[in-house]
Each structure stands twice: as structure tokens, then as C-alpha cells.
Amino acid sequence: MEKTASAQELKEEGLRLFQEGLYEKAATKFGQAQEVFVAEKNEIEAAETVNNLGVIYRLQGKWDESIAALDEAKAAFARLGDRNREAQTLGNLGGLYASKRERDKAK
């Protein structure tokens, strides 16, 4: 039970850092949280942190890393049947392609 709280705390710290614009530090926290969520077999939260990493990479202009993370999160949400989070991730991918002026790839 304590590990779940720790993973959640890491995720929340990552969100706080993200909101402050401290993207590298936020990415580190999200990565740590994702590792714990995976170890705990909490697939939804693990995918959520990967989605968050994808957003950070997009803001940093790390297009390939962002696409890879968002595709991974999208696939996980689809497999887990979480249509709302899958749609959110698709929106993030669409925003990424719009930023790159590749609207034809936003699907």
C-alpha cells in the first residue's frame, strides 16, 4: 500500500513541477512514478505517466520521444478499455502534429 502512495506522490510532484514549467524535473518524477506503477501492475496510472511524459517532450520539441510516449500511452489505454484517456492521448497527438504543421498525421 505504501508503494502506491509513493507512486502517487511522485506523480503529484511531477504535476506540480510541470505547472511551474520545470519540465526536466517533472519528467524525472513522472519517470520514477511510472516505474513504481509498472512494478505494482497499475497499468492505468503507468500509462497516464507515459502520456504526461509525452506532453513534456512535445513542449521541449522532442518530437520523436513525444510521439513514442503518446503512442505507447494510447495503445495501453486502448488495450485497457479506457476510452476517455485514449481520447485525451489522441488529442495530445493531434496537438503535437498541429505544432509540427503536420495536420494530415493528426488521426
Image (cartoon, helix red, strand yellow):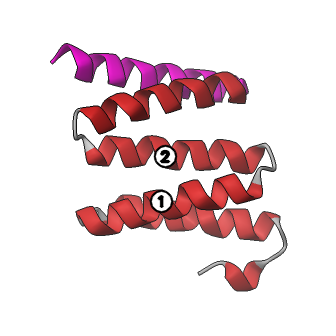
Q: Is residue 17 covered in magenta? A: yes
- Where is 32 relative to 67, above or below? above
Residue 72 — which label? 1
Residue 99 horizontal/vertical position (percent): 80, 63
Q: Residue at x 34, y 61 (%)?
A: 77
Could you tell me which quadrant the N terminus lies in? top left
Hey, what amino acid is under mark 2? Val
Residue type at numbered disc 1: Glu
The front one of 29 and 93 is 29
- Give the magenta range: 1-22
Q: Is residue 29 left or right of residue 12?
A: right
Front residue of this view, candidates 39 and 43: 39
Quarter residue 91 falls in: bottom right
- As drawn, 58 above or below 106: above
Residue 7 in the magenta stretch? The answer is yes
Most extreme residue toward the bottom is 104
- Residue at x-position 73% and y-position 86%: 104
